[in-house]
Amino acid sequence: METADSTRTFVRNVKRVIVKVGTAVVTRTDGRLALGRVGALCEQIQELNSQGYEVILVTSGAVGVGRQRLRYRKLLNSSFLDLQKPQSELDGKACAAVGQNGLMALYDSLFSQLDMTSAQLLVTDNDFRDPDFRRQLNDTVNSLLSLKVIPIFNENDAISTRKAPYEDSSGIFWDNDSLAALLALELKADLLVLLSDVEGLYSGPPRDPDSKLIHTYIKERHETVITFGDKSRVGRGGMTAKVKAAMYAAYAGIPVVITSGFAVDNIIKVLHGECIGTLFHRDANKWASTGEIGAREMAVAARECSRRLQALSSQERSKILQDIADALEANEKAILAENEADVVAAQQAGYEKSLISRLALKPGKISNLANSVRVLANMDEPIGRILKRTEVADGFILEKSSSPLGVLLIIFESRPDALVQIASLAVRSGNGLLLKGGKEAKRSNAILHKVITSAIPGTVGERLIGLVTSREEIPELLKHDDVIDLVIPRGSNKLVSQIKASTKIPVLGHADGICHVYVDKSADMDMAKRVVVDAKTDYPAACNAMETLLVHKDLAQNGGLHDLIVELQTKGVSLYGGPKASSLLKIPEARTFHHEYGSLACTVEVVEDVYAAIDHIHQHGSAHTDSIITKDQKVAEIFLRQVDSAAVFHNASTRFSDGFRFGLGAEVGISTSRIHARGPVGVEGLLTTRWLARGTGQIVDGDKAVVYTHKDLSGLEIA
């Protein structure tokens, strides 16, 4: 896994960048110029130029463009008889001469639209043999860059003296990839970006589903295991040429990134330090222990350990949880000391009070966590439960049983107690686990992880639970869909949304916790005040805290609404109103109903009746937890049946929406998705199913000899 402190910090010192764009990027499959991609490239260069970067472009594509144009001209000037004859291949040098004109015209036009100027520099291999040429080249480029002009280089194929430059490795350069590497050294660039038609360097042909993107090329590990696919569909060398050029520049001290030119912002992402494409760096071998290979190894190790965990008896797995609970209590002082250091650091950094509240392990918290782990240890065995048993045919029994998911990646913010809950749930459910906590809880997470893994026996292995230490490692982990089975993000809307948009791995979680309490006209007002105050103030930072209070219109007339508002204000709650409530109560109007405060603040609105409340929740809620306060059972049933949320309550605080309070022992998170688990996710939510069949030699044989009975045997003991 690559970290900002190791592999991608080189971008901090980058000023001069050389970007090489391949023929497959600047042209379409039919040979015509790819106007959209070239336009996006120019826009990126313009943005970088405005930010003070010195950008030099090396472009291929002239031969391809010229070939397409000359074929068209030849077609127009040919008779029908001429077209029946075998067609000779067009002269490559003529194609280069014609295509270069069109290619530069496009660049000139696009840059002009962006209020920029470009300059053409055509070079040949022999030019670089002349020291005077090299000095003049530097002077010219420096002069152009000082004027904010974009130098555009290309090999002058029209007058090249080599017949097959892609086969001639004896020259100073032999294609535009190697030209770009040579220019990077000659012009003292800080970074070389090679744009291709694939995301970067893969372990095998990119179309092979078993091929994996290599994010950091480590020569000692990758040189002998990479299998290259076909060369570029239109260019000279394809990925082989790019790797050679990248190695040449990287070992001379210039970092190189090979990435896709099909994306509209990859160059900018590289310069922002994002882990995309394949990085070549002369110090890459020093990062081998923390490189992208480590990400897979961590996930693979977690899977292997989980299989050993599953092989244990139920009593042995329970014993591990009991040992974890004991270890937490035995190390309470050390845990609290590290947590206090995190809290102090967060306060000094100016973090919001709501985050610090989630971060702090309050008195008694370790004991409560240990007890929740013991609850899990004493629960019925969840793995291998027979959910359904069917006699398929005489002597052929099929069983559907509960089974661990495999390897979980949990990304959570702020709350170190979540680490304990998640780890204990993983052990109870037989899953391997990778954990990524927030940087603000770094010390707390580290010691909790150490305490928990020290209680895992060697027969299973402490790598059952891996701790990811850098945020920059998350994008890499999200690519390993073959070794990670489920991602559960616990945190802000932004975090969850980013995770969902960044991975092919199934994601379980909720983006918002916009919970409502609706107080009906028939509500017991003493009960309503207690429930509303608890739902908002018991733990305002929690995702199950009330964010919107809906009140029946009659309560605005008889004083009930006023009483609720006074109760909340007495507890220090800041109030914002919808259009009706803000006018009635003279409070600031909320900017939006779809807002999660996470603090002592909430939105208030007046509604016509229970149906209006339901419509409001469906329109503005997040399907997390919603509650109704009413004495009218009929109204309560309407609310319970029609509100489409993961948890719906009657006469109870939304704060009860919690795995421990539901009797699940703990929770790995709360899910608002409609696939797999929904609501607080405990052990059952971390299990899937599999089918076990026990036969006596049955064969299908076109179903001729099978008499299907499909008899339900669930609940019956099978000898």
Image (cartoon, grey):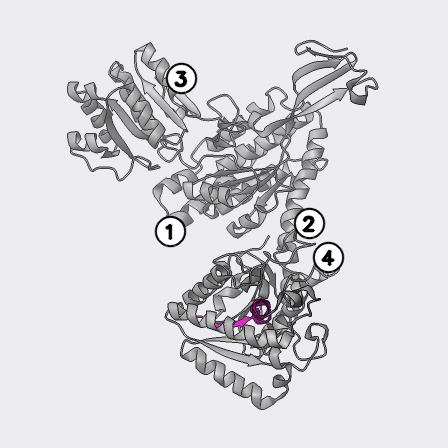
Q: Disc 2 marks which amino acid?
A: Asp
Label 2 environment density (alpha carbons within 10 Å; few <14, some 14–19, many ≥20): few
Single out the residue that lies furthest toward the bottom: 132
1 or 2: mark nearer the eye: 2
Q: Earlier in the sequence, mark 2 or mark 4?
A: 2
Q: Amino acid at mark 4?
A: Thr
Q: Position of residue 154 (x, y in %)?
A: 56, 75
Q: Residue at x 50, y 59 (%)?
A: 266
* Sequence order check, earlier mark of 3 and 1: 1
- The stretch of residues the image draws in magenta is 52-77
Residue drawn at point x = 33 percent, y = 36 percent: 594
Q: Upstream in the sequence, badge 4 or badge 1?
A: 4
Say what secondary structure mark 1 lies in: helix
Residue on which the image places disc 1: 348
Residue 370 image offset from top left, x and y in percent: 53, 29
Q: Quadrant of the C terminus?
A: top right
Q: Which mark is residue 641?
A: 3
